[in-house]
Amino acid sequence: MKRSVLFLLLLFLTSTNSFPQHQQDTVKIMCEYSDNNRGHNVYRPSWHLYIGIHISGDAEMFYVGPSFQAGADYQIKKRIVLSGYIHYFTKKVIGAEYPGIFWKGKFKTFTGTFLFQGNISKSPTKSFFLAGGVALQRWRDKYSDNYDSWDDKRTTLIPAIRIGYFFPVDRYKITIELNGTGPYSYSYSNIISTVSVLEILTQLSLGMRFIF
């Protein structure tokens, strides 16, 4: 009987001594895991909608006026963004100089664009950026004056660029940027010969975006 009691007492003392050691080992492992992973946060891709207002112009800057943009950014990494947007621009001009001399025109573009953007800084809140991609553009120029008139339409797939800077405003961001589409080349014939034309930029826009 005494041997049984002594055996149970010894077993109890052994168990109580080993439990704190096991607890310490567990805490030590958890602390080491926490220290090893501190500062190595994995960036999670995110979507950001945006709207923009710009001052736009055609290739010759004959039509200049406000334009509007709406789209979304998909931020893959801190420096890499995929961006898509639609841009609408329309402008009318009417003028006259002397009796009988007049001109009237209406210009319109509707552009859908996909861009691959690179940010210079690792900061997710402020950085210069440069983007390039492609644009599908519906373009129309309807014009008439004393000597000539035309109504040109085209739908083209052309390069697109965007360059600018974004900075934080509260929880959101604002960009100051320059957008361009082009180049585009075409030919037309007159009475004398065939003329080739190269538009370096079919549309140029300067303005800002508000990114949610």
Image (tube, rainbow, N blue to C red):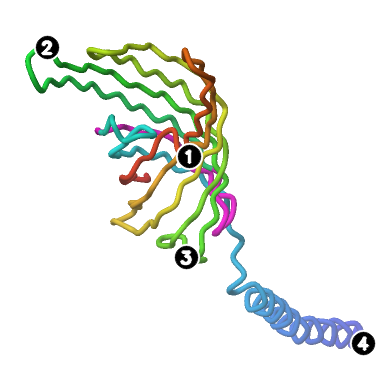
**Eyeballing the image, is 46 above or below 124?**
above
Q: CA distance from mark 4 to mark 1?
A: 101 Å
Along the line of sight, the residue nearer the viewer: 161 or 75: 161
Q: Which residues are magenta?
A: 65-82
| In this rendering, position of residue 108 left or right of residue 5 | left
Q: CA distance from mark 3 to mark 2?
A: 60 Å
- Kind of residue indicated by mark 1: Ile
Spot occupied by residue 175 in the image (x, y as percentages of width and height): 35, 51
Along the line of sight, the residue nearer the viewer: 149 or 200: 149
Q: Which residue is mark 3?
A: 123
Magenta span: helix, strand or loop, mainly? strand
Residue drawn at the location 48% of the way across and 25% of the way down: 137
| In this rendering, position of residue 108 left or right of residue 43 | left
Along the line of sight, the residue nearer the viewer: 78 or 131: 131
Asked where in the image residue 111 lies, by quadrant, the reply is top left
Q: Which residue is mark 4?
A: 3
Q: Nearer the viewer, mark 3 or mark 4?
A: 3
- Kind of residue indicated by mark 3: Ser
Q: CA distance from mark 3 to mark 1?
A: 33 Å
Q: CA distance from mark 3 to mark 4?
A: 72 Å
Q: Nearer the viewer, mark 4 or mark 2?
A: 2
Asked where in the image residue 12 lies, by quadrant, the reply is bottom right
Q: Which residue is mark 1?
A: 200
- Kind of residue indicated by mark 4: Arg
Which quadrant holds the C terminus?
Answer: top left
Spot occupied by residue 198 in the image (x, y as percentages of width and height): 51, 34
